[in-house]
Image (cartoon, helix red, strand yellow):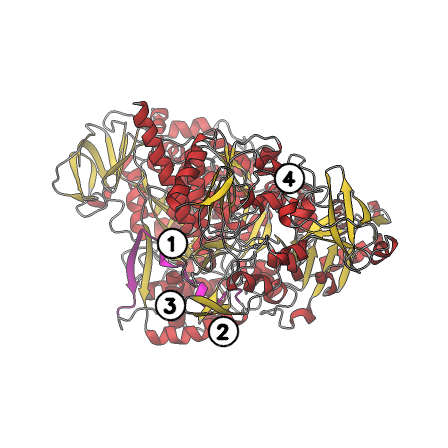
Amino acid sequence: MISGRTLAQGAGCESKMSPEFFKAAAVCHLSEKDFKSLELSEGKNVLLKNEFGQVVLTAKADAGLPDSMVFIPMGPWANVIVGKETGGCGTPHFKGLEVEVAATNSPVLNIRELFSGMGVSGYV
Amino acid sequence: MIKDAVCSFCGCLCDDINVEVEGGMVKRVRHACRLGSSKIMGHGRIESPMIRKEGKLAAASFQEAYDRAAQILLAAAKPLLYGWASTSCEAAKKGILLAEEVGGVLDSTATVCHGPSVIGIEEKGLPGATLGQVKNRADTIVFWGCNPAEAHPRHSLRYSSNSCGRFTPQGREGRKIIVVDVRETRTAKNADKFVRIAPGSDYEVISALRMLVAGKGDVVPEDVGGVSKADLADIAATLKAARFGAVFFGLGITHSRGRYKNIDNALSLVAELNSHTKFVIMPMRGHYNVGGIGQVLAWSSGYPMSVDFTRGGPYFNPGETAACDLLARRDVDAALIIAADAVSNFPRATAEALADIPVIQIDPYENPTTQLSEVVIPCAVVGVEAEGTAYRMDGLALRLRKLVDSILPSDEEILVGILESVHKQRLLRANEEA
Amino acid sequence: MIVKGGIVYDPANGLYGEEMDLFIDQGRMVEQAKGEEIDARGLLVMPGGVDAHSHIAGKKVNTGRIMRPDDARQGTEPRTAVCRPSTGYTVPNCYAMGYRYARMGYTTAFEAATPILEARHTHEELEEIPIIDKGALTLFGSNWQVMECVRDKDLSKLAAYVAWGLRAARGYGVKIVNPGGGEAWGFGANVKGINDPVPNFDVTPAEIIMGLAQANEMLNLPHSIHLHFNNVGKPGNYTTALETLDLLKDIKPSRMRQIVHVAHMQFSAYGGTSWRDFESKAPVIADYFNCHNHATMDMGQLLFGSATTMTADAPLEYGNARLTHNKWSNHDIELEESSGVVPMVYFRKMLVNAVQWAVGLELALLVKDPWKVLMTTDHPNGSPFVNYPEVVTLLMSKSKRDAEMATLHEQVPKRTVLGGIERELDWTDIAIMTRAAPARILGLEDKGHLGPGADGDVSIYNLRPEEVDTSQDHALVKKALANAKYTIKGGVLVSKEGRILAAPPGRTFWVDAAVPQADTDRLMIDLEEKFAKYYSIQIANYAVQDAYLPHAKVIRAGLPVPLQEVA
């Protein structure tokens, strides 16, 4: 798994609570071959899982990606499956993480749902 | 019509933006990219300061918010003051003063972006140039692990592959563009050569290029990081044949296996290329003033990020004093998050530590950090509603303009408000004790 | 304020160690005043120190800090009720710069090299340096507009550009570094001598230097051109120095001062054909200065230990990096300059370093007139400025020099003449070389002396000039100079025995020179084209805004007629 900037994610990154940001960042890009082999279609979701956590994202085929690699726009969804270890340099490994990918019928959590288990509840 | 405004979105700091203002509102933005115009046009804002009461954020006055923020910072043994990449240097100066006053740790978003680049520079130095130098001279440009087509949309036209200058009148036609990445990005599509490397193999590929450039190709294996030796030899030859070469690198290399060692190696490659021709290298800084907080911190404290002021004298040790490490170790007991969304941008397990400590947020926009903040203070947007200084990705300082008025105070004014409240409460406490 | 009973050295006013009272009112020296009394009875009193060449602010200084966290750790001092925290040794943070100068009795320091494009950054740092007054010299030596005016022999347009550039940079004077070399370095090359043409520009370094010197005098600027020669730091470069100096000897100065100030002469007084037969040519250089009156110099003294080399002479820094295998930063500035930064350690037992150490001292001792030689270390290139007391004591004590010489590489006596120099400077010489001369050379009328109207900057040292034997008691002298008993800046007692008592902001001097509007109009056509085609920013965002100089002190200069200011 690698995470990084996209134009749409960038345009929305200062309006994180908006539906546009959700559409731009709660996405998982897969190579065309992987997309097919998981029997995905437009609008279908995938479940990504590793030792750090799991997250459901909307699947998207991406001709620029090699097989066995997924790309997620940087942000809160991608960070669910990023570990906290920095290897002594202050920066976590945001890229190059092992992750299991499977098709799923579970829904993608919106940004409020994503953080609902965390911190002080009763947000106004 | 305001001419030549400076865009405060990314590290390009495009300064040719024309903005039409009518009735105190931005009506139209010309020359900016989608990222910049979306910011300048403006969108959903936090309208009032808020303080959490009985679990819920409730509207409060600015003074109440400053007092509560000061109270939190004074009560903390080791507060973290984090963010600073999307605000002015003037705000950064007040923030550093505040960190000194309350004995905290000040860190910037560089820590999750180009922090490894900073460490690499500490190891090797940075052979660089201003962007105009690249525009006027570069005939060979390498984009390594960066995707300006999406992250810095006007970079290629204003400064790099597609720009024209004194010794580069043909623009894109006269240049060789090499893109090195693990995926074929939009930037790769504009390249003469796209080199796809295996994830996490940057260090090996750079090492192979260093050997080839030094004429020690015999030690290079047939395949390095998924790239054939012949291909690598071809790239090395292109680099050496450049009249003026430039390497731009991004998070693809700082976030991957090797992190700061990748940068160290890339800096060495560029230093060595200068024995053959002219070469410069530059990190593609993301947020518009992430460079500025590094500059201000360096001249104020001696260190460009992750500075611990809890001991009186500044102390710096990334891996120990960086925001992510402090939170992962649960080593801070309060946080002021300004101009950044730590909750979204940190690894989930790191961000969770913020839920257990009081958080003060200063930001124009609501985001997941707002959700767990104790105090929320909305501010004017620097570069749109407030003046200030920012440093471009090449270290050039520019003055951001104020385009429209805002009823909200600037980050700088908010920090002064908190500082004054810190002084006031300290005096009060001293008097009580006396 | 009254400074009572000091032994006053104020050579600009003909006072060479006279017991007298000094009076300060509203920040200035006056004939009579009341108020706080400072007891200076029997103690050495001088005007506040003035450093005319030091790298204290701007991009390359901060680059030094960023690439040297190891250096920052060496100077950590915690925050106090008065002071912000300090860090660093060769590249101190801004606060440490102000405090450390003030502790030594210095009240003024000038940043030696700022490109116009990056002047905003320089002023951000200057403003952050507390206590001392400041200014920044502006780089013109590899600037496209300069080279084109010189090529076209359009002196009035060149003068208009210098005035415009100083105004845009809020700069104080014309700095020239390795003229033409910064442009050549844009493609990785350099110029080899003053008659070697600059690639693509059809001018020579000699022409650039001459053009800027003439423009400087046309504009009647307070300071002369401030020149870092070509070939600095190379064996055999004394010939370049002599050739360059000789170029300038017939230019008429517009003020009572030199035509050229030579930066860090030590780095340009070398003989030999390589590092193998490297030797001092200080005696030849000193002779030239003794026989001519159009040039002044600062020493650029090198001391053993840690330094950080930083200069707009980028090819020199690349050479340093290759030579030492140390880390290397380079920064080229579009249309204007290049620069580089390399950490360095100088060793007693390394012959080249030991000869360099001797060269600086030879220059200061062999030039007869102290008004021609400033005591500097080209901070932090030769050594950080906190080591000035070491340099002063070396100049004042033959026995100290001999003791030092005994610890150096054994070849030093063969490659230098230092061992044979008996001269020991006295307090008048030192007061000139660290106060009166730098102020006069910079054209700062209210600095470097204690006459009525001068700035109320006074340093008082815990030394009794009538008793102390500077030749023998050099350890005592060094200790006293490191921490002045009192430093008074603008009438405020800022430092006492090394303790900072107050940290008021200092002022920043810049020069606003008037030129005929017609010349500026012609110039603007060129500049607008350059911004449209070549610069990466708009002309509207180029000049330093006044917001960056809240404590500006503007010095007016320029052509006498017609009196019209630069737009």
Q: Position of residue C259 (x, y in %)?
A: 35, 58
Give whichever of discs 1 and 3 has the lower sequence position.
Answer: 3
Give the number of the mark in front: 1 or 3. 1
Q: Which mark is residue C529?
A: 2
Give the number of the mark in front: 1 or 4. 4
Examine the rendered structure and indicate whether residue C330 appears above or below residue B122: below
| Mark-to-mark CA distance, 1 and 3 | 25 Å
Determine whether the residue tagged by mark 1 lies in a helix, strand or loop: helix
Q: Which mark is residue A117?
A: 4
Task: Find disc 3 in the rendering and name its residue.
Answer: C159
Task: Find disc 1 in the rendering and name its residue.
Answer: C548
Residues at marks 3 and 2 on the same chain: yes
Residues at marks 4 and 2 on the same chain: no
Residue nearest the viewer, comparing B166 with C8 = B166
Residues at marks 3 and 4 on the same chain: no
Whether the residues at callouts 3 and 4 have beta carbons within 8 Å, the answer is no
